[in-house]
Every structure is written in C-alpha cells, then in structure tokens.
Image (spheres, rainbow, N blue to C red):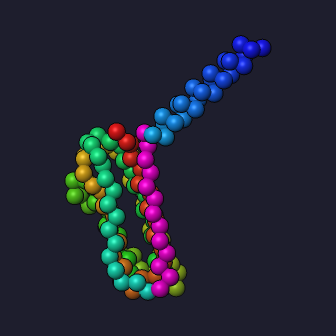
C-alpha cells in the first residue's frame, strides 16, 4: 500500500512539473477595450519577439458600430499582415475577426495599430509566443 502511495505521489509531482514547464514556455498577452463614446485617436500595441525563430500567432477582433476604424498588423520585419478599414454596415455593426497561423518570427516587434475616427464599438487582441 505504501509503495502505491509513493508511486501516485511521484506521478502527481511529475505531472505538476510538466504542466509548470509547459506554462513557462508559452506567453500570451491579451487586451481589449470598448469605445462607448465617439472616439478619434490612434493606439499602437507593441508585441515583442525576443529572439529569432520563436513561434508566434496573433488574433485581432474589432466590432464597429459607428464611425470608422483602421486596423493594421505589422510583423517584426515591418511587413503589413493585415490592413482593414471598417465601418458599420448600415444600422448593423461590422465585425472583423482574423488570426495569423502560428509561424516562426524574426526578432523584433510586431505591432497592432488602431486608428479611430468618430468610432464606437470594441476591439480585442490575443498575442501568443514562445519564451526563451
């Protein structure tokens, strides 16, 4: 009986160590905001890639119920990955929801740029990358 208890405890420790190790390797940054009042401003989110070859992915969602929003996603080499200009579709909000595939990135910074012109609605992003 004591041997089984020791084996079960060892297995639990191994599983806990594996889970902790997996959590340390992946980092996720999330952000969101709701524009309740007509807003005219620019917002730039910087998402670092600390060393070349790290796997990264990003998901961006915007809902525009009034005005206009321009959304631009740039990778660490400065290439434009997404460029969208959004307005409501008549009386209905317009939703833009896009994700990049997981890929190996160059060192540097990815950016998500939002430009609001008399805009109402919301946006969110989720950035996932490997840690060194």
* Vertical position of residue 46 compared to residue 91: above or below: above
Q: Can residue 38 be found in the magenta stretch?
A: no
* Vertical position of residue 69 compared to residue 20: above or below: below
Residue 74 sits in quarter: bottom left
- Give the left or right position of residue 11, taking residue 77 as reference: right
Residue 73 sits in quarter: bottom left
Q: Can residue 29 be found in the magenta stretch?
A: yes
Residue 39 location (% of width, % of height): 40, 84
Residue 40 location (% of width, % of height): 36, 84
Q: Main secondary structure of the magenta part?
A: strand
Residue at 39% over, 47% down: 129
Residue 87 location (% of width, % of height): 41, 80
Residue at 24% over, 51% down: 108
Report how many numbered discs are placed on residues in the image.
0
Residue at 39% over, 50% down: 57
- Give the left or right position of residue 70, taking residue 64 as reference: left
Residue 16 sits in quarter: top right
In terms of depth relative to the viewer, which is nearer, 28 or 114? 28
Highlighted range, magenta: 25-37
């Amino acid at each position: 009986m004591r041997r089984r208890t020791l084996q079960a405890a060892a297995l639990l420790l191994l599983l806990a160590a594996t889970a902790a190790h997996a959590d340390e390797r992946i980092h996720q940054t999330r952000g969101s905001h709701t524009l309740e009042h007509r807003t005219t401003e620019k917002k730039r989110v910087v998402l670092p890639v600390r060393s070349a070859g790290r796997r990264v992915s990003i998901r961006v969602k915007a809902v525009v119920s009034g005005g206009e929003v321009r959304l631009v996603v740039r990778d660490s080499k400065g290439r434009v990955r997404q460029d969208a200009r959004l307005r409501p579709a008549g009386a209905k909000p317009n939703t833009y929801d896009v994700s990049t595939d997981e890929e190996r990135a160059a060192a540097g910074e990815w950016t998500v740029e939002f430009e609001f012109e008399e805009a109402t609605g919301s946006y969110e992003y989720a950035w996932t990358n490997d840690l060194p």
